[in-house]
Amino acid sequence: MTLRGSLARAALVLAAGLALAGGVRVLRPAPDITETFYVFGTLLEVETRGVPEAQARDAMAVLGAHFRQMHRDWHAWAPGKLESLNAAIAAGKPFEVDPALAKLLAQGRELACRSNGLFDPAVGGMVEVWGFHADTPPEGDPPAEAVLARLLAGAPKMTDLTIAGTTVRSSNPAVQLDLGAYAKGAALDLAEEDLQAAGIRDAVLNAGGGVQVLGDHGARPWRVAIRDPFEWGVVGAVSLRPGEALHTSGNYERYFDKGGIRFSHIIDPRTARPMRGVVSVSVLSDSGALSDAAATALSVAGEKDWPRIAAQMGVTAVLMITDDGSMLATPAMMDRLEPVAGGFPAPITVVDLPKDVAIPVCPAG
């Protein structure tokens, strides 16, 4: 695209009312009540409509307390429950967690199993050696081959965990948990429950690459834009229905460049290296945690294997953009994807999901 074309497209995007940052953003007029929180290294914005301000502010206070607890207890590289759990796993000891974390870990284990381990929060050690256990981008060289070989030999996976009530133990001391690949989606799921408990039926929750909605926004749906990973703009928009979540994972979110190569925070558990070949994946479903985890798994699966993994994980609406700019989408996503600012930036290849996929049998305890 020419510079003139890029500028023209950007102007049209602004005219449409899009706030650009992260993987997806909401197209909307001024909200009734809005509040912003800092969770998991990103800004999380909550907007409510149609309720008295006092009711909305009370709900925001509850959300804020819960977000602070999640940020503390689910954080992989700061003092908290997860750090203590990782220390217990390394020592071969059981550890007591709260019910919310136990539920989150069980959900992560199920999603890891369904993805054939392409999404796997047990590989926190791999994430750490690449420098992504920090709030700032990594600096320096990639880890040595011997370090990666050692991590692969440990073969950490979520199915090594046993979760009995709130007692967590691992059969493999190499497991080091990092929940970043689905924590934002899970946090939005819990926030939705909090808002509903507060009597709020119309709201949008926006956390960087993820958006989740309650209600139908009156006569107009909540309309969400998917970021163009190559330039300042968007590739399209999706009008979300009540209870839906749209999450995008991309190699532009957290990364570092070395020797002309981009190293993303999305680690392939099979190689202990950042995934290659895919720039972004957007997944639409009725669960924030599922959409978030699936976007990661499909990024790792790559252009060849993602349809099978999507079918195994039970997601049908997917948009993938590869590093050469190719756009691939399922029929279910094409039914929902709307052009913005004059059309899609590239032709979209429609990819059917396989129907004869065997769903993995996952551990129950």
Image (cartoon, helix red, strand yellow):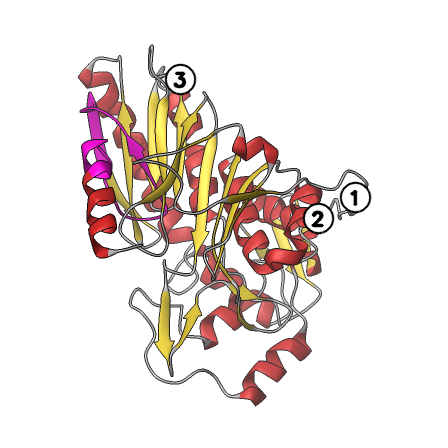
Residue 74, placed above or below residue 8: below
Crowding near the residue tagged with mark 2, few <14, some 14–19, many ≥20 C-alpha atoms within 10 Å: many
Residue on which the image places disc 3: 215
Residue nearer the viewer, 139 or 80: 139
Q: Going 78% across and 47% down the picture, which residue do you hit?
A: 360
Residue on which the image places disc 2: 308
Q: Quadrant of the N terminus?
A: bottom left
Alpha carbon separation for disc pair 3 and 1: 34 Å
Quadrant of res 262: bottom left
Q: Going 29% across and 67% down the picture, which residue do you hit?
A: 136
Residue 322 showing in the rendered view: yes
User: Between disc 3 and disc 1, whose residue precedes?
Assistant: 3
Q: The residue tagged with tag 3: helix, strand or loop?
A: loop
Residue 153, placed above or below residue 266: below
User: Between disc 3 and disc 2, whose residue precedes?
Assistant: 3
Residue type pointed to by label 2: Arg
Crowding near the residue tagged with mark 1, few <14, some 14–19, many ≥20 C-alpha atoms within 10 Å: few
How far across and down, in percent of the image, does residue 72 sit? 36, 52
Looking at the rendered structure, which numbered label has been put on residue 357?
A: 1
Q: Which residues are magenta?
A: 12-35
Residue 236, placed above or below residue 320: above
Alpha carbon separation for disc pair 3 and 2: 32 Å
Q: The residue tagged with tag 2: helix, strand or loop?
A: helix
Q: Nearer the viewer, mark 3 or mark 1?
A: 1
Q: The residue tagged with tag 1: helix, strand or loop?
A: loop
Residue type pointed to by label 1: Val
CB of mark 1 within 8 Å of CB of mark 2?
yes
How far across and down, in percent of the image, does residue 159 sit? 70, 57
Alpha carbon separation for disc pair 1 and 2: 7 Å
Residue type pointed to by label 3: Gly
Residue nearer the viewer, 170 or 202: 202
